[in-house]
Image (spheres, grey):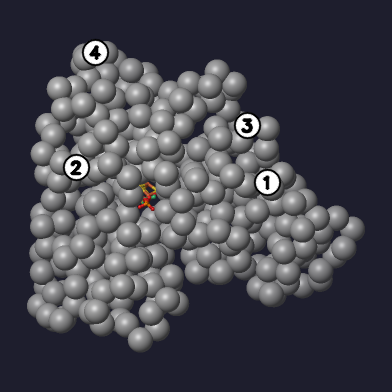
């Protein structure tokens, strides 16, 4: 943070900023504006610590559907802000940095996706929420990593399935549910870069550790895992397991909550390249406390979606939420 930066709420200058000044200024703005801060587990620790709600993609959508705040600050990536906006078109939804995209969403443009699904007219289109609002609107039903198995099981067995945009999650679902699927060949840039050989090496150094992995990882990595699940599932497994040591194969931000909940346990971030010991999503990490303060102060950048885009995306999103109760 720039130490000379001045923080102010309306006419109240706060002087030279210290982290506690920013936290205090955010809290004051939140009260004044009836705002709520919702953060994903992949946010930096300081953001998780000031959030009113921390969760996985499903939790953020469910919480977004029931909030009575006037302003939602979505400390996550753009598709999460769009989901909150689809559920709350009348509210102001702020995303601290609009450049916070997602490799899955960015590599599944709506026009190409429309041409792709047109080739499979009899297929039920199941789409992971990590996609744009337009792609959501082209889907029959949405899913997240925590409800995907349930959503697939809800589709009659005589209906073929097209799954997008994460091929690794799709392959995992095919194995777990036994359903064949046409896959869009997208991937998460963070999870795809985990290498099975590195996990094997790490496991050899820590034979007493359990491997816990997100289903966006490639199959060879998931084959090494003792538990596979969404971020919230990995967190609850870490809390309830009798093991004392875990190799965590997902974005390392989640380890903050694991360590807070289980200070007596050890969490080892799996490396996703040779030079670094932790995997960080470059999009998620665009958010900072300072940007949260600025967006609350100026009420921008706000997520804007055309009413017809919202109307089309709402149906598959509501189907998912209904099946997730
Ligand atoms: P979940 O938190 O829903 O498991 O999703 C992980 C993710 O990649 C979010 O970007
Ligand atoms: Fe997208 Fe992967 Fe980043 Fe999640 S971790 S926002 S799936 S790029």
- Helix, strand or loop at disc 4? loop
Which numbered disc flags the more N-terminal residue, 2 or 4? 4
Measure the C-alpha gap from mark 2 to mark 4.
21 Å
Percent position (x, y) of residue 252? 36, 65
Q: Quadrant of the C terminus?
A: top left
- Distance from the alpha carbon under mark 3 to that under mark 4: 31 Å
- In the rendered image, which quarter is residue 240 located in? bottom left
* Disc on the earlier residue, 3 or 4: 3
Q: Earlier in the sequence, mark 4 or mark 1?
A: 1
Residue 293 x %, y % = 69, 58
Question: In the depicted view, which residue is nearer to us: 279 or 122?
Answer: 122
Q: Quadrant of residue 159?
A: top left
Is residue 228 something one can see in this rendering?
A: yes
- Mark 2 neighbour density, 10 Å: few (under 14) some (14–19) many (20 or more): many
Question: Does any atom of ligand 2 lie closer than 8 Å to the CB of label 4?
Answer: no
| Marks 1 and 2, the one that precedes in the sequence | 1
- The numbered dot on residue 89 is 3
- Crowd class of label 4 (few under 14; some 14 to 19; many from 20; radius 10 Å): few
Q: Marks 1 and 2: which is nearer the front?
A: 1
Asked if the residue under mark 1 is in contact with the one under mark 3, i.e. CB atoms within 8 Å, the reply is no
Please state if 219 lies on the left or on the right of 192 as rendered. Answer: left
Residue that label 2 marks: 173
- If you read the primary sequence from the N terminus, does the residue marked by circle 3 or circle 1 appear first? 1
The tag on residue 68 is 1
**If you read the primary sequence from the N terminus, does the residue marked by circle 2 or circle 3 appear first?**
3
The label nearer to you, 4 versus 1, is: 1
Image point (54%, 49%), residue name: 63
77 vs 146, nearest the viewer:
146
Q: What's the distance in space between the residues labelled 1 and 2, CA to CA?
A: 35 Å
Marks 2 and 4 in Cβ contact (< 8 Å): no
Furthest residue in direction front, as rendered: 325
């Amino acid at each position: 943070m720039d130490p000379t930066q001045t923080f102010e709420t309306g006419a109240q200058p706060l002087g030279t900023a210290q982290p506690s000044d920013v936290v205090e200024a955010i809290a004051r703005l939140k009260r004044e504006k009836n705002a709520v801060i919702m953060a994903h587990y992949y946010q930096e620790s300081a953001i998780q610590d000031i959030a009113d709600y921390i969760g996985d993609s499903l939790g953020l959508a469910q919480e977004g559907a029931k909030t009575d705040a006037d302003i939602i600050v979505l400390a996550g990536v753009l598709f999460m802000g769009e989901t909150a906006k689809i559920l709350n078109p009348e509210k102001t939804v702020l995303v601290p940095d609009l450049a916070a995209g997602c490799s899955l969403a960015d590599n599944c443009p709506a026009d190409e996706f429309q041409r792709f699904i047109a080739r499979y007219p009899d297929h039920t289109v199941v789409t992971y929420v990590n996609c744009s609002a337009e792609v959501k609107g082209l889907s029959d039903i949405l899913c997240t990593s925590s409800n995907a198995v349930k959503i697939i099981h809800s589709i009659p067995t005589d209906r073929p399935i097209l799954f997008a945009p994460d091929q690794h999650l799709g392959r995992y679902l095919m194995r777990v549910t036994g359903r064949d699927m046409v896959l869009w060949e997208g991937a998460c840039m963070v999870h795809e870069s985990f290498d099975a050989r590195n996990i094997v090496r790490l496991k050899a150094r820590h034979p007493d550790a359990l491997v816990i992995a997100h289903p966006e990882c490639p199959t060879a990595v998931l084959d090494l895992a003792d538990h596979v699940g969404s971020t919230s599932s990995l967190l609850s497994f870490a809390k309830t397991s009798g093991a004392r040591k875990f190799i965590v194969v997902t974005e390392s931000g989640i380890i903050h909550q694991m360590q807070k909940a289980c200070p007596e346990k050890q969490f080892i971030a799996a490396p996703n390249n040779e030079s670094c010991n932790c995997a960080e999503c470059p999009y998620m990490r665009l958010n900072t406390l300072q940007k949260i303060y600025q967006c609350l102060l100026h009420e921008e950048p706000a997520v804007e979606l055309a009413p017809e885009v919202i109307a089309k995306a709402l149906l598959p999103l509501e189907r998912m939420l209904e099946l997730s109760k």
